[in-house]
Image (spheres, grey):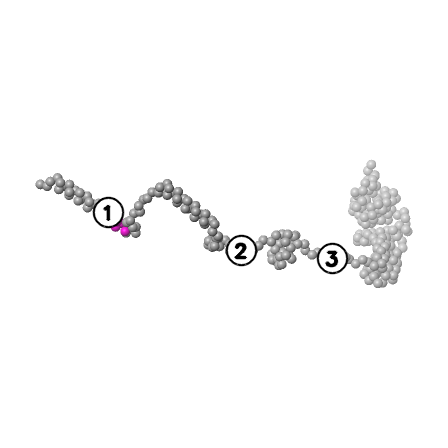
Amino acid sequence: MSSPVAKSVKKLASRSALRHSSTTSSARKRLVAGKSTHLKPATKRSPAGKARARKAAKTRVAKAKGKPRTALTKRQSTKAISKSKKPAKVSRGVSTARLGKVAPRTLASRVTQGRIPLPVKKQPSPPQPTHDEAAALSAFEAAHKEFSRGRFAEARNQFRALVEKYPAVSEVTARARTYLAVAEARLRTELALPRDADSLYDRGVIELNRGEYVAAQELFERALRREPEAAHIHYGLAATRARLGAIDTALKSLRRALDLQPKLRIRAQHDHDLNPLRSDPEFEQLVFASRD
């Protein structure tokens, strides 16, 4: 039988073997993972050592601040390059003489915004008419006024005098010759007109229906010179003057016609030639007086 001492020795041997095997296995694992088996000893600094370390760090920072910068970092160099590539801003008040050349885009934007005024071309003033041209124009207006009134004999004489007196004013004399030819043609037709009042009245009615109100007015006036108390001729003259827009003279002729022949009121109530007179209160009194 074994003694108790032998048993205890065996137990110690087995424990040491187990410890050795565990340490060897952990060492192998650390070697496989790439870690060294040496462990750094955990050292604790004393308060005096901490104070010395802080003082050394402060001195290093002070030396670093006092040294001049000799080289830039990569990020600082890229920022400096990007800033140097940016174009310089031009102030609004700087003139083009100081800048030299200005980009076309900036010039166009300034012109559109109204900063640079565009040159304005002065339009030439129209030429003033000469003394002969002004006199020829005034003579033409006077002759044309007689022509529009139906006084063709007087208009012919004035147009003829204008052409003879101002031959150098070609534009005015050309128009005067045209009106002169028309006036002479109208005078030739007047020579072929009938002489009695009834025939002149019939020709006046024809011209009124054709829309030739100036010719109709002249024919009715000629007929009245031959027969002043003819009510139907006064009525025809009133209708012609109403078509021409001469309201006052038309009402005067209508009043004379109704005084000579009151039965013409019925005709006047439905006559379309007298429509320009219907808005006048005097027309209402003349035409509808029999209804009172």
Q: Nearer the viewer, residue 18 or 223?
A: 18
Q: Which mark is residue 112?
A: none
- Report if residue 272 lies within the magenta region: no
- Tell me if residue 71 can be seen: yes
Q: Which mark is residue 123?
A: 3
Q: Are marks 1 and 3 in contact (CB under 8 Å)?
A: no
User: In the depicted view, which residue is nearer to us: 150 or 171?
Assistant: 171
For the point 41% across and 44% down, the residue is 54
Q: Position of residue 142 (x, y in %)?
A: 85, 55
Residue span colored magenta? 22-31
Helix, strand or loop at disc 1?
helix
Seen at 35% across and 41% down, the residue is: 46
The amino acid type found where label 1 is placed reads: Thr
Q: Position of residue 153 (x, y in %)?
A: 88, 57
Could you give the CA–CA distance between mark 1 and mark 3, rounded to whole angstroms? 112 Å
**Which secondary structure is most common in the magenta stretch?**
helix
User: Residue at the location (15% across, 41% down)?
Assistant: 8
Q: Residues within 10 Å of mark 1 (few under 14, many from 20)?
A: few
Q: Which residue is mark 1?
A: 23
Outermost residue to the left: 1
The answer to whether the residues at label 2 and label 3 have Cβ atoms under 8 Å apart is no
> Mark 2 Cα within 10 Å, few/some/many (few <14, many 20+)?
few
Residue at the spot of label 2: 84
Q: Position of residue 230 (x, y in %)?
A: 88, 47
From the top left corner, tell me how far across and down residue 231 is, in percent: 87, 46
